[in-house]
Image: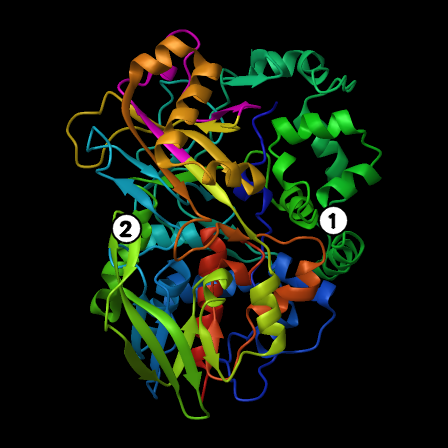
């Protein structure tokens, strides 16, 4: 198994923001930036529209990533001469970034957040919940890709420090850069954008090859597997291929890539054909078409984390393979990923109203009225506050909550049929994490020690990730222990964990780690403290991300972001980057442009 294991978000990192076209109807965009065709209801072949979105191609073949960097990082929206009242529903990255842009442009902005104790949505960092209060761990988003310049540049702009996330395991004494390098983006137009901050260029060190694979009763290091793949492969029903599962998967999907060095019009044509041909296929059907037999599919499914997602559409995997470099660098944020959403929360200040859950949205030709109920959280269990119903009137609204949460809100008049269909039918995936605290970082010790990266197993834990860094912010002494993401599962794998109690999850995750790393050490070093996060059971998220099934991109995707009267929509589910903060930010810039342009 190579270092480039497809992770949950890596599998779904279809790059792109929004296909653009000239404004229509009551929408008028600033002259430098065209509004997306899909948000204004323009008619374009669905597959071409998806191709343009994936490639981040705007109207007249402009580069939307370049435009959005200039808006979000450099200059903001033009100052308004006619301030509007705007309510943003949801204080996740999409909602807060939308509100931040509009507030800075001079509009009167209010953000309604259902949670009473935190902002951030599915960006959630567990803090002061472990035996060593200096330790923290991620319940949600945990890494940022260098293929997502909007996110990295926003971190730098807000003063949030980033450092390498070791997606693959490295030696324990591997040094990290003192200062993260600048963010740089080279456009297909020939232009290069950079924030001109930070330290020298950085490249991740080579993987150590020491983390473990524990399947079918065998235990080997990744290095040993790379040297003799057949030994492990044959355990999957006699699979006869002699390459690593990563190499086999790369070979199957790599031949379908549209060359990125072609002229942009040829890339659009190539990807339009790709969406047309393969969007109806699941990953399983795609692999069968490539002549794969069941044992090979089972081996790749287990070792490359595809088993629970074989029923997903194959397009995200094809796009990921084409656009995410094998040597991609990932980053994490000092103090946890929530430091980014904390910074946005600080910037918005009293504009955010906590503990207000939208239950109803009414609109007329002249305005919007939103009804909310008060909520309070106790140990992450929400409860409605009796007699706490409130209404707020506004000129425009931006709904930046998941489709699964929109499903439980009333709209008067009803949303369009296409929007309602997208809300009810778009597949919402499950993801569950179980985190365990240990007294020492025993996995880093000895001649086979490693830092970061993860182990794979066919036991219920499936994937285990180790911390890339353990030092605590503002602490003079490095904590001796660390928190391990003992089990990270998605889709059907996650839903089995969701059926367990918190204590049962911790017990099974501990036993699963002991099976991979050795019973005596794991049990001896466990502090007795652990936490779990089920996003399918999260009251306000109601799922981890909107992950497309076959045909859902062509049938439903456009409608997730179309404007409905005075109501606009944002969130990673409205982009081809579900489950990534990058998708949330791209949707935020798009939604802010739409509302800012309203007459």
Provide the secondary structure element on which disc 2 rests.
Answer: loop
307 and 345: which is toward the camera:
307
**Residue at (37% x, 8% y) in the render:** 520
Disc marking residue 258: 1
Q: Quadrant of the C terminus?
A: bottom left
Q: Residue furthest left?
A: 476
Q: Residues within 10 Å of mark 2 (few under 14, many from 20)?
A: few
Q: Quadrant of the N terminus?
A: top right
Provide the secondary structure element on which disc 1 rests.
Answer: loop
Q: How is the image coloured?
A: rainbow
Disc marking residue 159: 2
Residue 248, image x and y in percent? 73, 28
Q: Which residues are magenta?
A: 434-459
**Residue at (15% x, 29% y) in the render:** 476
- Magenta-colored stretch includes residue 214: no
Does residue 181 lie above or below 64 as drawn? above
Residue 307, image x and y in percent? 64, 34
Residue 28, image x and y in percent? 51, 84
Say whether residue 297 is left or right of residue 465: right
Residue 507, image x and y in percent? 38, 25
Mark earlier in primary sequence (1, 2): 2
Disc 1 + disc 2, Cβ < 8 Å: no
Q: Residues within 10 Å of mark 1 (few under 14, many from 20)?
A: some
């Amino acid at each position: 198994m190579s270092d480039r294991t497809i992770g949950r978000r890596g599998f779904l990192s279809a790059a792109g923001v929004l296909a653009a076209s000239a404004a229509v109807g009551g929408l008028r965009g600033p002259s430098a930036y065209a509004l997306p065709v899909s948000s204004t209801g323009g008619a374009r072949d669905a597959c071409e529209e998806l191709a343009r979105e994936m490639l981040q191609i705007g109207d007249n073949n402009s580069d939307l990533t370049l435009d959005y960097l200039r808006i979000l990082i450099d200059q903001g929206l033009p100052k308004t001469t006619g301030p509007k009242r705007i309510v943003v529903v949801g204080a996740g990255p999409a909602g807060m970034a939308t509100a931040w842009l509009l507030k800075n442009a001079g509009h009167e902005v209010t953000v309604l957040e259902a949670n009473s104790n935190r902002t951030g949505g599915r960006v959630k960092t567990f803090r002061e919940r472990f035996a060593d209060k200096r330790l923290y761990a991620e319940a949600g988003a945990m890494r940022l890709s260098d293929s997502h310049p909007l996110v990295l540049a926003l971190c730098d702009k807000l003063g949030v420090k980033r450092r390498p996330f070791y997606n693959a395991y490295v030696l324990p004494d591997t040094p990290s850069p003192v200062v993260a390098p600048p963010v740089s983006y080279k456009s297909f137009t020939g232009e290069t954008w950079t924030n001109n901050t930070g330290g020298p260029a950085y490249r991740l060190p080579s993987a150590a090859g020491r983390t473990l694979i524990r399947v079918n009763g065998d235990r080997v290091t990744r290095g040993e597997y790379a040297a003799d793949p057949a030994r492990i492969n044959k355990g999957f029903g006699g699979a006869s291929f002699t390459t690593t599962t990563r190499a086999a998967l790369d070979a199957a999907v790599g031949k379908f890539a549209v060359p990125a060095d072609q002229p942009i019009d040829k890339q659009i044509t190539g990807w339009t054909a790709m969406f047309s041909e393969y969007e109806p296929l699941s990953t399983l059907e795609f692999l069968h078409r490539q002549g794969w037999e069941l044992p090979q599919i089972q081996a790749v499914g287990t070792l490359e984390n595809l088993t629970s997602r074989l029923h997903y559409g194959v397009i995200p995997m094809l796009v990921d393979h084409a656009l995410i470099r094998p040597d991609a660098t990932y980053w994490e944020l000092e103090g946890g990923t929530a430091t980014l959403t904390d910074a946005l929360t600080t910037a918005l200040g009293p504009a955010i109203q906590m503990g207000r859950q939208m239950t109803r949205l009414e609109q007329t030709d002249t305005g919007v009225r939103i009804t909310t109920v008060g909520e309070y959280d106790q140990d992450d269990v929400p409860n409605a506050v009796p007699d706490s119903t409130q209404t707020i009137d506004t000129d425009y609204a931006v709904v930046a909550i998941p489709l699964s949460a929109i499903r439980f809100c009333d709209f008067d008049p009803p949303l369009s049929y296409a929007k309602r269909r997208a809300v009810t039918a778009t597949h919402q995936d499950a993801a569950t994490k179980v985190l365990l605290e240990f007294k020492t970082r025993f996995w880093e010790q000895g001649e086979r020690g490693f830092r970061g990266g993860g182990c794979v197993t066919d036991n219920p834990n499936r994937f285990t990730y180790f911390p890339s860094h353990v030092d605590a912010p503002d602490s003079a002494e490095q904590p001796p222990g660390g928190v391990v993401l003992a089990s990270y599962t998605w889709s059907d794998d996650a839903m089995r964990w969701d059926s367990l109690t918190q204590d049962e999850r911790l017990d099974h995750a501990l036993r699963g780690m002991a099976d991979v790393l050795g019973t005596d050490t794991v049990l001896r070093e466990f502090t007795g403290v652990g936490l779990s996060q089920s996003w399918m059971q999260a009251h306000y998220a109601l799922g981890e991300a909107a992950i497309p099934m076959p045909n859902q991109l062509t049938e439903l995707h456009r409608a997730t972001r179309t404007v409905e009267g005075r109501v606009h929509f944002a969130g990673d589910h409205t982009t081809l980057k579900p489950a990534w903060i990058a998708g949330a930010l791209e949707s935020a810039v798009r939604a802010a442009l739409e509302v800012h342009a309203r007459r």
